[in-house]
């Protein structure tokens, strides 16, 4: 099974500032990688996914993530944070056996 | 095409009672996954099922917890003799292989 590490359980940024949420995976074979967002008292919504077609993946709500094999990373970024981006973000990885594992999550706070 | 349907959304049980959580996957999805989210924690994998088969139950507690995905009807996560520590949000997801999961809105179990 894949292992996913999210650095920083809490990230706080000012509105309009860059958002950077870090994710590293452990695998000798590049897995399928995903970012999900969870708003309070809701389920998880898929933001974007990497499936080896392109290393820079664009998702919904202005988010994007770059797959870097040399760093085994898949960090999530957004150029300008909006108040509505405040949520919990989960990085996940799956192998060919369809076995997905999630990171512990990063709670994003956006300050006015 | 309805998404992943979970019911009930909220469930309150007294210690020692049984909890049954239901999950209907998206139409055409034959893989179902159950995850548990404890307060202030990430998602923990519990079990992966296909129709009439448990594929991976490595995340299931050895006692009191069971899951099934019958040929007809929803997937059921069953918790017998609930204890306060079982209080959590339980999420179901479904997918075709390696395409990213679609999550339900979860069932929030409270044990009193």
Image (cartoon, coloured by chain):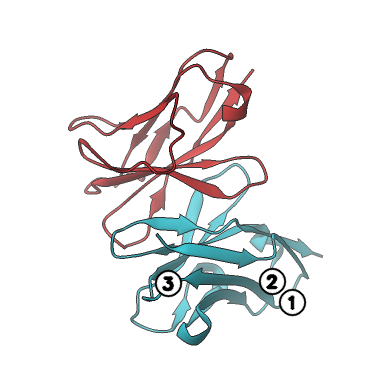
Q: Determine the residue located farthest toward the front in the rendered image.
A: B62
In this view, the residue in front, A24 or A78, is A24
Which residue is under mark 1? A17
Mark 2, residues whose alpha carbon is within 10 Å: few (<14), some, or many (≥20)? many
Please say if B50 is above or below A23: above
Give a yes or no on whether discs 3 and 2 share a subunit.
yes
Residue B24 falls in image quadrant: top left
Provide the letter of the chain coloured cyan. A
Give a yes or no on whether discs 1 and 2 share a subunit.
yes
- Between marks 3 and 2 in the image, the one whose residue lies nearer the viewer: 3
Give a yes or no on whether discs 1 and 3 share a subunit.
yes
The mark nearer the N terminus, 1 or 3, is 1
Q: CA distance from mark 1 to mark 3?
A: 32 Å
The chain carrying label 2 is: A
Which residue is under mark 3? A27
What residue is rendered at 45% in x and 78% in y? Answer: A57
Element on which disc 1 rests: loop
Residue B76 visible: no
Image coordinates of residue A46 in percent, x first then y, are 46, 60
What residue is rendered at 42% in x and 72% in y? Answer: A27
The chain carrying label 3 is: A
Q: Quadrant of the C terminus of chain A?
A: bottom right
Q: CA distance from mark 3 to mark 2?
A: 31 Å
Which residue is under mark 2? A81
Image coordinates of residue B68 in percent, x first then y, are 29, 31
The chain carrying label 1 is: A
Q: Tell me if label 1 and label 2 are in contact, CB under 8 Å.
A: yes
Image coordinates of residue B44 in percent, x first then y, are 51, 46
In this view, the residue in front, B80 or B107, is B80
Residue A31 falls in image quadrant: bottom left
Q: Determine the residue located farthest toward the left in the rendered image.
A: B71
Please say if B110 is above or below A32: above
């Amino acid at each position: 099974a894949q292992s996913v590490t999210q650095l920083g359980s809490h990230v706080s940024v000012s509105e309009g500032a860059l958002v950077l949420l870090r994710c590293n995976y452990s695998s000798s074979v590049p897995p399928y990688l995903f970012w999900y967002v969870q708003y309070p008292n809701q389920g998880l919504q898929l933001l974007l996914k990497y499936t080896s077609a392109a290393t820079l993946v664009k998702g919904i709500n202005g988010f994007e993530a770059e797959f870097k094999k040399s760093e085994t990373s898949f960090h999530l970024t957004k150029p300008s944070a909006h108040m509505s981006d405040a949520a919990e973000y989960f990085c996940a990885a799956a192998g060919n056996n369809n076995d997905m594992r999630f990171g512990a999550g990063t709670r994003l706070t956006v300050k006015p | 095409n309805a998404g992943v349907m979970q019911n009930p959304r909220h469930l309150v049980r007294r210690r020692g009672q049984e909890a049954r959580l239901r999950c209907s996957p998206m139409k055409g999805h034959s893989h179902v996954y159950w995850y548990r989210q404890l307060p202030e924690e990430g998602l923990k994998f519990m079990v992966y099922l296909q129709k009439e088969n448990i594929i991976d139950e490595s995340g299931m507690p050895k006692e009191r917890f069971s899951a099934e995905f019958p040929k007809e009807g929803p997937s059921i996560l069953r918790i017998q003799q609930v204890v306060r520590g079982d209080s959590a949000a339980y999420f179901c997801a479904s997918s075709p292989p390696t395409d990213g999961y679609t999550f339900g809105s979860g069932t929030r179990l409270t044990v009193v």
